[in-house]
Amino acid sequence: MIPRTASPTRRLRSAALALTATAAVIGGLLAAPAAASAAPAPDGMTSQTAAASCWEIKQLNPAAPSGVYWLVTPALVAPQQFYCDQETEGGGWVLIARGRDGWKPQYQGLRTPAAIRNTPSGTGAFAVAQLPSRTVDALLDNRRVDSLTDGIRIRRARDAAGTAWQEVRFKYQSRDRWVWTFGAEHRVASYTFDGLTGSGGQTNSFGGDNAFRRVDTNAPQAQAYVGGLAYGASVTGTNSASTYLYSSTNGGGNARPFAQMMLRPRLMTADLAYPAIQDAGTTAIERTPLPESEAITTTWGVQGLANGRDSELSTEVQAFAQVGNTVFVGGNFRYVQRTEAGADRVEQRYLAAFDVDTGEFKPGFRPVLNEQVKALAALPDGRLAVGGAFTQVNGQARSPFVILDPATGATSTGWQLDVQHRNTGGVASVRGMSIEGDWLYLSGAFTHWVRPNGQAASAWNGGRVNVRTGVPDGSWNPLLNGTSVGVEAAKAGDRAYFSGYFKQSGQVFTPSGTAIQTTAGAPVVQPVWLPQFSKPGADYAGNIWQLGVAEAGGKVWLGGSEHSLFGYERQGFQRQTGFITKAGGDFQAVEASRDGGLVFGGCHCGDWVYSNAYTWDGVGTGWTQADKISLFGAWDTASGTYAQDFAPLMQARRGFGVWALFQDSRGTLWAGGDLSRSVRAGEANQWSGGFARFRARDTQAPTRPGSPAITASGAGATLSWGASSDDRAVTGYEVLRNDRVIGTTTARSFQVAEAVPSDRFFVRAVDAGQNRSASTTKLQLSAPDPEPEPDPEAVTLIETGSSWHWRFDSAAWPAGWNAAGFDASAWPEAPAVLGWGGAVGTDLTVGAPTPRPLSAQFVRTVQVEDAAELSGAKVTVRADDGVVVYVNGQEIGRRNLPAGTLTQNSYASAAPSFASAAANTAVFEIPAGVLVDGANTIAASTHLNYRSTPSVSFDLALTATRG
């Protein structure tokens, strides 16, 4: 059962409340607390006592029930709440996902962690929720997934009513980090179905038969492409909203059951290595640069095919460029509009302008072209260079290259270039542009460039022109024997790369990719770069074309045919890294980020990208990772690895995918092609006409909190600090004790339940991007004055195990039941411990009414002599679930109960176990003057957190010091 609320139970101060001489009298149940400790026991009940794992909680408290607990590891950084199954096979399982149909493969998971922990089962849990992969890894403290002693646990419904269940376990053959890409054929080492064992198979489908002993994670057309932890084909389901066995059509096989997925990392706090924090505090922690996975809300898009052709080479968007505050979008679209339905539609073919910040359409830019745009570049003088397949611009005949005014779209009066294809039957086109230094490099299909004065220069499928004078470099001709597509001028200025459909650069064999020196004569870089291909034919025949090329991070990135993106070292061109999209398509666009830390790759792919894979089809067995990719992705250029944190979700109108990628001056990534849908924040699906934008994620940490202070507060301490600022917004503050985070708050103060002088505290700010500020310097309590020697005249007024008059009834409380002089002699009397669910002296459930009452009352009278001579009077009470204590009608304390007026039917706010209540007694001090000479009435009421709580206990001791 889950406690009614997640409110933490308060913990006892360790040393300051020791009962000294009195403890020898009380003993047993209410033994004196242990010596002072700077690290409270990790019971998982509060963020300050977060445990390393559900397993640790169960080991320290075998009676711990299933429910929501706080966990923290060094990798998790801050305590978070998770649902723990503490019953199955000894407990210790953490729930990482649950749901019926609609399991997703994306790295960022699905829905919220709160949905998983707060609704772990039942029909309300049918909508799939999965923790982010990074969170799952953090629960393992970044240990290998294949090292889990108990493997991966799946609990699945066996029938439509959800009354019968199956337990499945499986282990990976090799898996370092967590992924949700079960359909990507990760190797399974072994598995069990309700104890029946087997081995082999892959995560897309493994098991011992085609019925209940199978897990099938494929999402076939027969199931409307909806994924799940399905049974074999012979297990059928229905499409009822309430069934625990779902199929998209009634009677369809491979039923998707409601399922829970759990792990059991056997982590103990004492075994974890938290980084030590110096007195000066922590330094700022900032995320690495990446775009956000969620698309920016669509403001405008493009739609329609202006030339009527619907093919991969005629997608709506094929090029981007920025001039000032305007981003230009080129391609094969007909309209610019706000919505899919055509709101505010404007006919603006092939080329349009949008505001870099807002994405708003700029109607003042209205060029008129007669064919599609395939390349754009911003010239140093602020004009826009446009290339493509057009033959007319603004009503005038024009080769497929033109320079436009970026404000109006008018043809520029400055230098222009006539791009020609003089081979018989040749059609000139410009496919790519790249600027470095004084040179604009062009790729495409052409043979000559002609200036307005008639001066011509040979440029076979590639060349360059001076961006300041417009003069083509006749001494620099790559002499490519086929169309070039991609072009990239190296920032070092020493070379330019081309990719495409050629096999030679002059007389040098350069299949589909080449590096040309920028010196006169355009010699090929030595040693010659000979690209490798994922599926080459004999003598480099067949599918070897390459479409995108970029240089970044000391590597040359080449993408193209048969689903390949390979990285080569800049010097020597040794292939260093390789990626294949097995169930996808060719890479079409390769673009480096502005700082060179990332390479973006676009493709007509929608399933998996395999790391360290070099062949297609089949991919092979040597690959190391299989991550989700949706039409485009990002790669870290320094490490040569796939950036799985960037996981956008996209749809393409015809599946042609992404053909253009561009990062603007604000860091926003623009992706274009035949895109039709994207997912924005909040998992909201939206129309994205032709292109979508992705804001650069926040990588700037907040400022350090100011004016920190600490004061003693009872057994603990109160921390306070000044506000931090952030370029976006501060979302909270983390409080650290010694070497780890113990709590998060949006306020600028924090109450620490227990603190000793040796504790060192720090505070830092956190923003929505999970950037963390530098922390404050250490905050530390002063050592208290030594406590006086205990008074040898300590007295015990009520011992543990004493007899109490009690009632356990659903009727309203009797009037004045807790007041001085109340006569409880008509109530039963019995010795403590009173309650049920453990070693009790009196079982209150015997003869109790049905339904079970929500509270029980206890009254005892004690005689006191010379009350004015007593000091330090206190009650020490053991109770679960909640308790309130009165002395002579005055409330002296409550625990696990809400504020305000209490009644017979008030619920407790937490549900500690029988053992936890015994180990965590509450101490309430009795104010001076409350105890009087003669008879004194001590009354208490215990309250249930929920009616079927497994245990209730009550015992109380009253002590004081005479003198």
Image (spheres, rainbow, N blue to C red):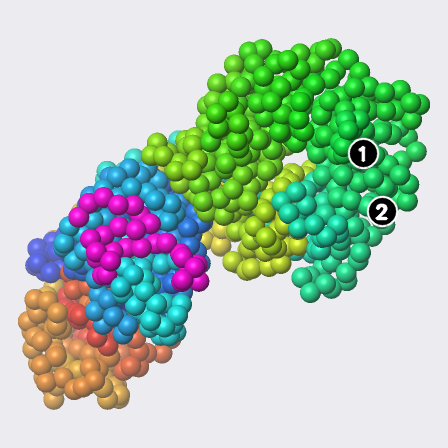
Disc number placed over residue 401 in the picture, else none: 1
Residue type beneath disc 2: Val
Is residue 129 visible to us here?
no
Image: 138 above or below 449: below
Q: Quadrant of the C terminus?
A: bottom left
The residue identified by callout 2 is 368
Quarter occupied by residue 895 = bottom left
Image: 880 above or below 309: below
Quarter occupied by residue 213 = bottom left
Q: Nearer the viewer, residue 205 or 389?
A: 389
Q: Nearer the viewer, residue 69 or 659?
A: 659
Disc number placed over residue 121 in the picture, else none: none
Q: Position of residue 924 (x, y in %)?
A: 25, 64
Q: Position of residue 172 (x, y in %)?
A: 26, 42
| Rendered residue at 36%/59% (across/down) | 228
* Principal secondary structure, stretch drawn in magenta: loop
Circle 2 residues within 10 Å: few <14, some 14–19, many ≥20: some
Circle 1 residues within 10 Å: few <14, some 14–19, many ≥20: many
Asked if residue 532 lies in the magenta stretch, the reply is no
Q: Position of residue 273 (x, y in %)?
A: 30, 35
Is residue 454 visible to us here?
yes
* Residues drawn in magenta: 198-226
- In the shown orientation, is residue 534 left or right of residue 389? left
Quarter occupied by residue 422 = top right
Q: Position of residue 901 (x, y in %)?
A: 36, 78
Image: 49 above or below 885: above
Q: Quadrant of the N terminus?
A: bottom left
Asked if residue 217 lies in the magenta stretch, the reply is yes
| Rendered residue at 60%/37% (across/down) | 589
Secondary element at tag 2? loop
| Rendered residue at 60%/54% (across/down) | 653
Mark toward the start of the polypeptide (1 vs 2)? 2
